Amino acid sequence: MDHFAEPYRIKVVEPINLISREEREKRIREAHFNIFNLKSQDVFVDLLTDSGTSAMSDNQWAGMMLGDEAYAQCRNYQHFEETLRDVFGFKYFIPVHQGRVAENLLFSTILKPGDYVINNTHFDTTRANTMHKGGIPIDLICKEARDPHAKFPFKGNMDVAKLEDFIREKGAGKIPACFMTLTNNSCGGQPVSMENIKAVSAVLKRFEIPFYFDCARFAENAYFIKTREKGYENKSVKDITREMFSYADGALMSAKKDGLVNMGGFLAVNDGELEQKITNLMILIEGFRTYGGLAGRDLEAIARGIYEALDERYLEFRTKQVAFLGEELIKRGVPIIEPTGGHAVFINAGEFLPHIDKGAFPGQSLVVALYREGGIRCCEIGSIMFETKDANTGTSEYAPYELVRLAVPRRVYTNAHLMHVALCMEKICSYKEKLVGFEFVYEAQYLRHFTMKLREKAAVGAKV
Ligand SMILES: Cc1ncc(COP(=O)(O)O)c(C=O)c1O
């Protein structure tokens, strides 16, 4: 990889600390092996998520000082709306304090029990919110995504033939919405091509099914279209974004990713009647229509952040930094999902730890090992997150892959921090056969990974 450097310099620093190995061992046990229970000050490099963890720019912090905290129609809402209309082109933009509220508002309004919601791959909150309203989430990911080593450039794509078959089988009346997640987070942060967006949109138009984007990482997706899809190399990321969104009827966004802010999101629609219904529900649960659970200053930071995320020098650095971490892991023999996606490197823990069964969660085993080895916090994206159980038979369907996500916060860590991660993985490679699986002591019905308590399974042949 060519040498690359951050297109920004550091103005404010936040100290971080690698606590001793003995302390890390104590902390992870106290946390019941659930990294969501670890205190932030006990973590050295935090790759748990790229959500809400971005460093804001001086321009965004300056905007925060211009917060207009009027209850209704504050100036920052006007700027927020103007910006979003300029970038995404929809008619109505409803602010919310984070992405899952947009999911809840939309699904509460459009779903009836037994309806289907289609997605390339549902993110966990989108899946849970669909199910919470009695909906049935259906993932129709393209076949290339099933091969973790295939170098296909748009593994986030939807399988268009399967989409058409599914609609014919169930009937359009049972499908109030079809989504595309850009980039496809649960499938390795992989992008969706413009060609696929157009093809999906054409099918949905024919069946009159509304098309929405779950667009937390729209700018990274647009940058991959520019760098990987023929015909887009000379277009600006902003023009590519406008084209992508021109095929959709609405979108929901957690602005905590490509909005480059620590909190916020929105729901966008073109349908005025739907907007009215959502507004009424929103006033009940989230706040008035022009602030949606956010302060005026937060809306200003989003408006500025959305434009900064379209800066192509930033996007080039961002995607190269993630790819750098992926390459350093591959060099050390660690299997990852290739090519690297936009916001994270996904280690294929199932392949890395073949001696641990899916039901003993090899991803979690690696997550715990990374904390023990180097104070690194990251997250399992495998059967802990996505196992489904048949209520009648009690049988389990495990996730297709047991992944560990190393999410890279935006504008936060240097490549030296990422080398620390690669070197810790190198050490883990030397004793990986000794790692053991986990079992549940406590699990909630929905989104169990956030609150679970686990215990280590004994190593095969070990005396307990
Ligand atoms: C694709 C996608 N959709 C929705 C969400 C939910 O957003 P939030 O965490 O802001 O509620 C996330 C968060 O990670 C996400 O990645």
Image (spheres, rainbow, N blue to C red):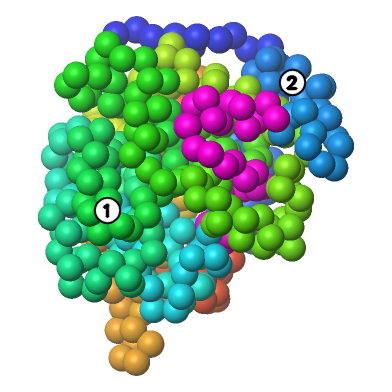
Residue closest to the eye, 69 or 228? 69
The residues tagged by marks 2 and 1 sit, at their Cα atoms, a distance apart of 40 Å
For discs 2 and 1, the disc positioned in front in the rendered view: 1
Mark 1: which secondary structure? helix
Residue of label 2: 63
Where is residue 464? Give x, y as percent. 43, 75
Is 320 located above or below residue 25 in the figure? above
Residue of label 1: 204
Residue closest to the eye, 115 or 218? 115
Q: Using the image, tell me which numbered label, if any, was put on residue 399.
A: none
Residue farthest along the right direction in this orientation? 70
Is 133 located above or below residue 372 in the figure? below
Q: Amino acid at mark 2?
A: Gly
Q: Residues within 10 Å of mark 2 (few under 14, many from 20)?
A: some
Residue closest to the eye, 63 or 437? 63
Name the residue located 62 percent from the left edge and 45 percent from the top edge.
Answer: 94
Where is residue 191? Give x, y as percent. 30, 36
Q: Main secondary structure of the magenta part?
A: helix
Q: Which residues are magenta?
A: 78-105
10 left or right, relative to 344: right
